[in-house]
Image (spheres, rainbow, N blue to C red):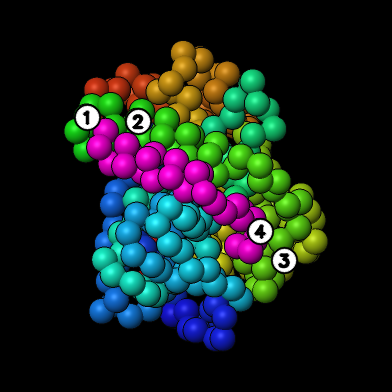
Amino acid sequence: MVLEREGKGLSYVKYEHLYHPVSTPERPILVKEVEYRRSEGAAYHMHYATELAVLRTGKIERLYLGSSKTCEPGQIWFCGVWEPHGYEVVEEPCTAVVFITSPDALAALRFSEAPAFNSLAAYLADPGSRPQLYGGARDEALRIAAHALAVTSSDPLRSGLWSRTLLIELLLTVYDGWVPPAFASTYPDRAYAAVNMAIARTFSTEDFLPVHRVSSECGMDRTSFSRLFKRVMGIGFSQFALRYRLSRSAEALVTTGEPLKAIAFRFGFADESHLHRSFRRHYGCTPSEFRNRSDAVVSAPEMLPHRR
């Protein structure tokens, strides 16, 4: 399928899936400079990884379901999890610095000194309700973007830390003065709204979430919700939520000294053996092996399959 233009924005007809390698605990954030070309015409995509971009040069029209936005240098755009979107270049050369982030890494950005800070808020909001930058804030966004390119390319050993630090700095700049809307999505496509709500609910907790509870919170019966989620995401909700909890478990294994039993309990597994079986099935090694081989490259599976 592909997304098609329909007046202002897109109609949800067809789309192309993209893959970004940011699903491992070792590389949850990717910063890169992207050049968009007018010769490509309109391009329409969806991807699991979230996207926050700062336009550096040129002009580009960003297309969403039922809406569009024209960006100039210093302005930003967001793309949420599997959010249908497109773009059309208005003025060349058109370049942007893009922060591509694993959604679970964003969800993990919680701070005791600012408990109300929600790094995912703008990604989950309706495109028309997302924050915009004006005046000096646009200059600040351009500065952060240039800094991100410089440090992540010149210091590969610490590029992951720089990427995380500068993403937080950019989010703080973007969220300054912005009031997130209540999460009652008004997307024109009800399917995406319900799935988006389920994703937000998943990332709001570390514990096990039964399908019936989430479907009820989305205002749907379990069967209809399950069919809808799998149609949009390409994977069942239970499997999606499990892979998220495994991803968070893997992060805890690398970044904390918690015993396996505590990690299993924290992330909603019945016991240590339950975590062991699930972890081995999805990561190809045991939790202990994953923790002990911190100097080796562990091949972790994608959070979601690349749909074709």
Left or right of 166? Residue 264 is right
Q: Are marks 4 and 2 in contact (CB under 8 Å)?
A: no
- Label 1 crowd (10 A; few <14 / some 14-19 / many >=20): few
Residue shown at 64%/20% (left/top)? 113
Residue topped by disc 3: 186
Circle on res. 162: 2
Circle on res. 155: 1
Q: In the image, residue 213 lies at what x, y percent?
A: 76, 49
Question: Where is 230 relative to 120, above or below?
Answer: below
**SS assignment at label 3:** loop
The residue under label 3 is which amino acid type?
Thr
Q: CA distance from mark 2 to mark 3?
A: 35 Å
**In terms of sequence position, does the residue under pointer 2 or pointer 3 come before the other?**
2
The residue under label 2 is which amino acid type?
Trp
Residue topped by disc 4: 129
**In terms of sequence position, does the residue under pointer 3 or pointer 4 come before the other?**
4
User: Is 22 in front, or is 74?
Assistant: 74
Residue shown at 52%/27% (left/top)? 273
Q: In the image, residue 174 lies at what x, y percent?
A: 55, 44
Q: CA distance from mark 1 to mark 2?
A: 9 Å
- Label 3 crowd (10 A; few <14 / some 14-19 / many >=20): few
Residue shown at 34%/50% (left/top)? 97
Q: CA distance from mark 3 to mark 4?
A: 10 Å
Question: Where is 185 relative to 86, above or below?
Answer: above
Q: Are marks 1 and 2 in contact (CB under 8 Å)?
A: yes
Q: CA distance from mark 1 to mark 3?
A: 42 Å
**Stretch of the chain drawn in magenta:** 124-151
The extreme front residue here reads 135
Residue shown at 36%/35% (left/top)? 163
